[in-house]
Amino acid sequence: MFDQLTDKLNNAFRKIKGVARITERNIEEPLREIRMALLEADVNYKIVKEFTNRVKEKALGADVSKALNPGQQFVKIVHDELVKVLGEEAEDLKLDPKKTNVIMMVGLQGSGKTTSSGKLAAYLKKQGFFPLLVPADVYRPAAIEQLKVVGKAVNVPVFDIGDDRNPVSIAKKAVKEAKDKGFNVVIIDTAGRLHIDEELMKELKEIEKAVNPDEILFTVDSMTGQDAVKSAAAFDKELPLTGVVLTKLDGDARGGAALSVKYVTGKPIKFVGIGEKYEDFEKFHPDRMASRILGMGDVLSLIEKAEEVVDKKKAEELQKKIAKDQFTLEDFRDQLLQLTKMGSMEKILGMIPGMSQIKNAQKMMDDKKIAHLVAIINSMTPKERRNHQIINGKRRKRIARGSGRPVQEVNQLLKQFVQMKKMMKKLSNPSFLGKMKNLKKLRNMNFPF
């Protein structure tokens, strides 16, 4: 969602590239472009003004690090200030696994509360909790059924409300049942409205008083821009919010809500929805988001995603095969399939430092491309997959027909596979690794120029 903002910020940074030192004159134009980029991204104007003033003050007063040139120092200052706007540090939910914790999900209608409730339940289940979903939206048609569908999809029980249509009563009964049956997290999906009204707030306050929640998370659709921030501020006046869940961060929104909501409400963004799948739900890390916005990637999140899908035992076996030069097309196919489990290639490439600066990077390795490569490898015989050298011209034509891909793509795959094998063999060589250790340490940040 930050593509346009990233491009404009990087254009601003290029204006200061190569300067001998930072002066008020040579940062004037980059600061103006940064200001315009943030305003066009629908960031609150007060935040933009304070942000650019702080960047200017720090840039002119900074002692330039010996490890960074002035242009890079300027980028680092912008990065650090972005982190402050987004919330400094990631904040966890305040939950105790030894007791029954209650989480209220609140927000306007259409903000994604029900889906986010399911995503949060799936997330907490992975953390070792035992969640119970509670349908407290008795007004919206099919809301209860929707939560049941969500609960089934993430394999989390949904509280049976029976004939009860009183949200406060439902919440109280659900908490009691959770305590009786050993659930340690109750997630209450409350009703939303098309706009904020007294009736809605009164009901939410009554639920809050009845169940004394440990967390009240305001769910906000990032596509609604500054309207989302206004809604967050209004809810925060009436309820003791503990955090924010930003949904649809993978959409075409300009990013203003993400960059404004913490400043306006003072409440941390705790989670973000980054896709339609239930696993597309992440803990929010301000520093990582700032890096993504500036096109520096997000290596830590990429590693975490890899760790979720990679079988450690298989990874060790693969490492041994690479060292012995026994890496086959079957192994290559397995790695491609594991890559798809991490999410879309667009998201993965966005986490790789510098990849946002490479034009058509996504087209070079998108989800369809991976599917084509897998189809080509699947069209080979087991013998061909384990010994690519026997694949002659006749076999290549047969593989192309079987996979529905042109012969050129089969040739390209085999060529790339051979190159990759050579590179892997070199990287696993002890002498090469020894040389690498003697090189200077890589800089902590990957700058966009």
Image: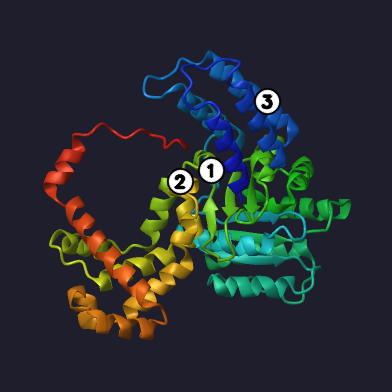
Q: Where is 49 relative to 100, above or below? A: above
The image position of residue 429, as x and y in percent, is 14, 51
In the depicted structure, whether residue 425 falls above or below residue 266? below
Q: Which residue position holds label 3?
A: 50
The answer to whether marks 2 and 1 mark residues whose Cβ atoms lie closer than 8 Å is: yes
* 255 or 156: nearer the viewer: 255
Q: Nearer the viewer, residue 234 or 442?
A: 442
What kind of residue is marked 2?
Asp
Query: From where the camera sits, is residue 84 visible?
Result: yes
Residue 97 bears which disc, if any? none
Q: CA distance from mark 2 to mark 1?
A: 8 Å
3 and 1 marks in contact (CB < 8 Å): no
Q: How many marks?
A: 3
Q: Residue 91 is drawn in which quadrant?
A: top right
Q: Of marks 2 and 3, which one's residue comes earlier in the chain? A: 3
The x, y position of residue 213, in whole percent, is: 65, 51
Q: Between 241 and 436, which is closer to the camera in this rendering?
A: 436
Q: Horizontal placement of 301 versus 317: left or right? A: right
Task: Tell me the number on the disc at residue 289.
Answer: 1
Q: As shown in the figure, which amino acid type bears the numbered disc 1?
A: Met
Q: Position of residue 219 (x, y in %)?
A: 68, 53
Q: Which residue is mark 2?
A: 298
SS state under label 3: helix
Taking the view exactly as shown, the residue that stands out farthest to the right is 198
| Amino acid bearing label 3 | Glu
Q: Quadrant of residue 132?
A: bottom right
**Mark 2 falls on what kind of element?**
loop
The residue at the point 59 percent across, 21 percent down is: 27
